[in-house]
Each structure stands twice: as structure tokens, then as C-alpha cells.
Amino acid sequence: MINNPKMARIIAAVVIAAMVITLAAALFGCAAEEKSPGKDPASGLTIVAVEDLPAGGTKG
């Protein structure tokens, strides 16, 4: 797929860097543990989790 060895090395380095950053974030607990506020302070819109959405989507 990638015939250029230099480009293959660059892509491999980027993929490995992304994996290392993800692993470091998981190990150091860089995840949102606190619940988000119920409303966006800037727009006033209510924040709804995906699991709270109705099944089936919208009709119309």
C-alpha cells in the first residue's frame, strides 16, 4: 500500500506516538471523572448523554 519507505516510517511514528499518548493518559488517569454540568454555560443548552437518547432516532 505504501511504497515510499520514508512515508511508511513517518506514518508508523505517528501511530506509535498516538498509542503512547493514549497509554500514558490511561495510566495517569487523564479521564473526565466528574460529571459534566447539566447545561452548557455559554448557550444554555441541556447536555444529554447518548444513553439517555430515545431509541429509533427522529422521524419526520
Image (tube, rainbow, N blue to C red):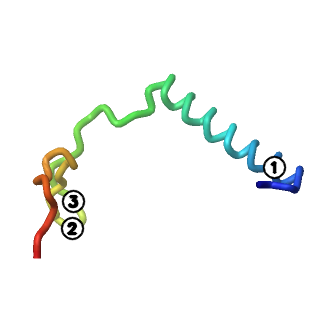
- Give amino acid for label 3: Pro
Q: Nearer the viewer, residue 42 or 28?
A: 28
Which circle's residue, 1 or 3, is located before the other in the chain? 1
Crowd band around label 3 with a 10 angstrom C-alpha radius: few (<14), some (14–19), many (20+): few
Q: Residue furthest top?
A: 27
Secondary structure under the numbered disc 2 in the rendered image: loop
Relative placement, left or right, of 32 versus 52 is right
Q: CA distance from mark 2 to mark 3?
A: 6 Å
Q: Residue at x 62, y 41 (%)?
A: 18
Residue at label 2? 43
Q: Nearer the viewer, residue 3 or 41?
A: 3
Secondary structure under the numbered disc 1 in the rendered image: helix
Relative placement, left or right, of 19 versus 10 is left
Q: Is residue 39 above or below residue 32?
A: below
Residue 37: x and y in percent read: 19, 47
Residue at label 1? 8
Residue 38: x and y in percent read: 15, 50
Which circle's residue, 1 or 2, is located before the other in the chain? 1
- Give amino acid for label 2: Ser
Q: Residue at x 88, y 52 (%)?
A: 6
Q: Residue at x 45, y 32 (%)?
A: 30
Q: Residue furthest bottom?
A: 60
Residue at label 3? 41
Residue 59 lies in quadrant: bottom left
